[in-house]
Amino acid sequence: MSARGRRQLGVIGLEFILILPFMIGLLYAGLVYGMLFFHKVEMQRAVDAASSAVYSLDRRNHTNYSDKVTDHSNDVLDKMVASLPERIRTKLTTQTCAPDGSNADMVILKCTLVAGNGEPESCGSNKTDTGSPFLPQLSIGPLGDFPPQPKCLKAVAAVTF
């Protein structure tokens, strides 16, 4: 093999060594963000089903309709949470369906699921997250953790009744 051929092989090897960590990082980040998206979609599906369960009740059959709505939605939310993947269920910190009293003109039922290690009140806000990330991260020394991700996931659905 000529000297020129050996140099080209060396350049190809060097390019491979320089590019490989970036390719692995991109694949890992894609995997982590895909899992986060899947978890968020599953949680949102659960709260959507729990909040829309209100419409299956007949108002005429209940004297205290708002209590029945809350109980029924919480029952549906419990069933939906039981069908979530175990990775999400074990990280749930908040699981509620309750009337939201912020509007005096109408009754709003708000179903909420919060999973992760962050504070449930600050989850999804612009406040600084505390606690560990939702999924494992790689620590790259002075560059920080990779890939950046939220400390918690929050899914909310609300309906009026």
Image (cartoon, rainbow, N blue to C red):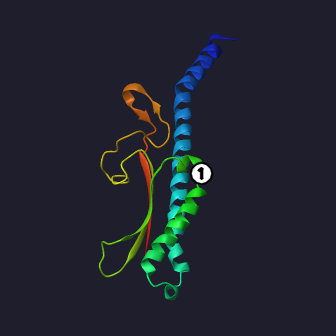
Furthest-right residue in view?
1
- Give the x, y percent position of residue 45: 54, 63
Specify whether residue 116 is in view. yes
Q: Secondary structure at mark 1?
A: loop
- Give the x, y percent position of residue 154: 43, 56
- Residue under circle 1? 85
In which quadrant of the rendered image does the N terminus lie?
A: top right
Write the residue at 31% across / 45% down.
128
Furthest-front residue in view?
63
- Give the x, y percent position of residue 63: 45, 85
Specify whether residue 161 is in view. no
Q: Quadrant of residue 98?
A: bottom left
Q: Look at label 1 and name its amino acid.
A: Pro
Residue 53 versus residue 137: which sits nearer the camera? 53
Q: Quadrant of residue 111?
A: bottom left
Q: Could you tell whether 35 is left or right of 146 in the image?
A: right
Vertical placement of 105 versus 152: above or below? below
Write the residue at 43% across / 28% down.
140
Write the residue at 58% across / 62% down.
79
Vertical placement of 141 versus 126: above or below? above
Report crowding for label 1: few under 14, some 14 to 19, many 20 or more residues within 10 A (C-alpha): few
In which quadrant of the rendered image does the C terminus lie?
A: bottom left
Furthest-bottom residue in view?
60
Write the residue at 48% across / 70% down.
71
Tally the marks.
Answer: 1
Vertical placement of 24 versus 33: above or below? above
- Give the x, y percent position of residue 5: 65, 16
Residue 5 versus residue 69: which sits nearer the camera? 69
